[in-house]
Image (cartoon, rainbow, N blue to C red):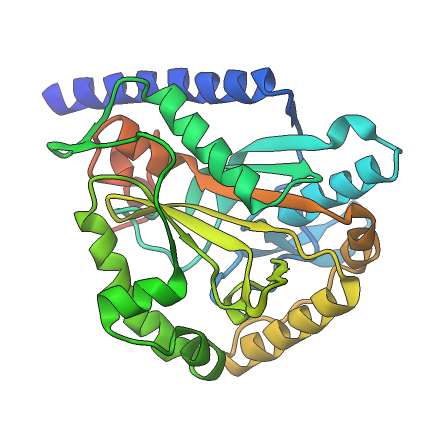
Amino acid sequence: MLVDTMHWHMLQKRTHILRAIRELFWSWGFVEVDTPLLVAKPGQEPFLDPFETRVEDASGHSYPGYLITSPEYAMKKLLAKSALGEAPEFANIFQLGKVFRNNEDFGGTHNPEFTMIEWYRLGANYETLMTDVENLLCKLAPQQLVFQNRTINLQTPWPRMTVEDAFKQFANRTDAIELAEKDPSEFFKVFLNEVEPKFRELDHPIFLIEYPASMAALAKKKESNPRVAERFECYIVGIELTNAFSELTDAAEQRARFQAEQLERAGLSKTVTPLDEEFLRELPHIKIAAGISLGVDRLLMLLLDAPDINEVLFWPCKDQFAD
């Protein structure tokens, strides 16, 4: 059938693009790593839900296990080993593979299992990562990007807008930071209903930068304004493509932020898991670094002009689980 032929053609292009992404990172001097998908201690983010399971050994002992929402913790442990000189080749690393998030939509820009590339640079900050994203898109779409009959101007540098300025311009609010600190639910309501939709109207990518520090639990605070963090997200025609930041490497501050997230998870009646003590021990060795995650399936949607994520997946969850 025609639909099947078109889908298989799309999937062939997917494999070529994944290869091109890998080759590009190799050419930049990055080392590809392969960290666990099944872990004992997942991330603490209050609004992300890991898949929970049980791991049983041959002796019948049972342990709680979780599919990762991100390979972040393991990759940062490798950065620490590199910074200590134990594994110097892991200073610039990337991982291209599957991650998992429960309670997600089956379609649009979401799928509970999806492909993500995450990369880290030792000794860098989030400014460098913005350049990485620009270079990546311009290499993969060297002529122009056309999505749903819209031509997207990829000329660099791409515009940058702070979260505070976005709230002022698009929601007529001057209290973005205060709102995030006092009422996170209301912050997200304003952001999702009034701010984010405006990015769909732009004919160019945009970096949304300087998130409230309370919305960036793993990010370094901006020295000139500690109420915001050195964090950015990249949007193209309203599609959130990346999440990135200069890394917080103060273990005491990171522990306090994790503990605050544990309290928030408890308040939301979500599973509260133990902290990853190995991660906290290793974190100070990193000193200066920056890391980023990019949704590869969403990138493929843009590159292949697919309005729904299911069009670029081999087996979407909707085909396996939905009635």
- Observer-nearest of 158 and 76: 158
Q: Position of residue 45 (x, y in %)?
A: 55, 64
Q: Position of residue 302 (x, y in %)?
A: 27, 33
Give the quarter of the image for residue 154. top left
In the rendered image, the vertical position of residue 137 relative to residue 64, given as above or below: above
Q: Position of residue 247 (x, y in %)?
A: 65, 52
Residue 315 shows in the view: no
- Observer-nearest of 209 and 295: 209
- Residue at left 76%, top 39%? 78
Residue 230 appears left or right of 3: right
Give the quarter of the image for residue 9. top left
Residue that protrudes farthest toward the front in the picture: 224
In the rendered image, the vertical position of residue 56 relative to residue 312, given as above or below: below
- Residue at left 46%, top 84%? 182
- Residue at left 27%, top 38%? 310
- Observer-nearest of 253 and 6: 253
Residue 89 appears left or right of 25: right
Residue 7 shows in the view: yes
Quarter of the rendering occupied by the N terminus: top left
Residue 208 appears left or right of 130: left
In the rendered image, the vertical position of residue 3 relative to residue 70, given as above or below: above
